[in-house]
Image (spheres, rainbow, N blue to C red):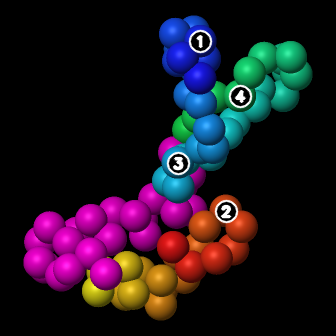
Amino acid sequence: MRAVCHTGKRPGPVPLRYKLWYDSKNRKARGKIVIDEDKAPQIKELFRLIVDKRHSTRAAQKIVNANGLRSTKGNPR
């Protein structure tokens, strides 16, 4: 893990709001991590509920899960 971090790569899976993007012209290139435009509004809403509306993290999570936020495997976050 330390060697992976020293080379500038991120160890482990991609965070929830991001996705891997591969260049179609260069198949051997490593994928870049870019913002997932489908999930970004839901994550922004989650933080807005916590910071602006002063909901607890658990209450905000329930609200966003009811609106359809799911993990990469399809489970509620």
| In this rendering, the label closer to the viewer, 4 or 1 | 1
- Contact between marks 3 and 4 (CB within 8 A): the answer is no
- Front one among 15 and 1: 1
Of badges 1 and 3, nearer the viewer stands 1
Q: Is residue 25 above or below residue 73?
A: above
Tell whether 39 sits left or right of 24.
Answer: left
10 Å crowding of disc 3: few (<14), some (14-19), many (20+): few
The numbered mark, 2 or 4, whose residue comes first in the sequence reads: 4
Q: Give the Cα separation between the discs numbered 2 and 4.
A: 17 Å
Sequence order check: which comes first, mark 4 or mark 1?
1
Q: Position of residue 10 (x, y in %)?
A: 56, 28
Contact between labelled residues 4 and 2, with CB atoms less than 8 Å apart: no
Q: Position of residue 58 (x, y in %)?
A: 31, 81
**Which type of secondary structure does the marked residue at label 3 adopt?**
loop
The amino acid at mark 4 is Gly
Indicate which disc, 1 or 2, sits on the residue closer to the N terminus: 1
**Looking at the image, is 19 positioned above or below residue 41?**
above
Residue at the spot 39% in from the left edge and 87% down from the top edge:
62
Viewer-proximal residue among 70 and 36: 70
List the residue tagged with mark 2: 72
Residue at image mark 4: 31
Say if 40 sits above or below 32 in the image: below
Instruction: Pick whichever of labels 3 and 4 is earlier in the sequence.
Output: 3
SS for dot 1? helix
Q: Which residue is mark 3?
A: 15
Which portion, as a residue range, is magenta? 35-58
Tell me if residue 46 is in the magenta stretch: yes
Residue for point 62% across, 38% down: 12
Please state which of the two labelled residues, at mark 1 or mark 2, is closer to the viewer: 1
Report, in whole angstroms, how far the alpha carbon at label 2 lies from the one at label 3: 10 Å
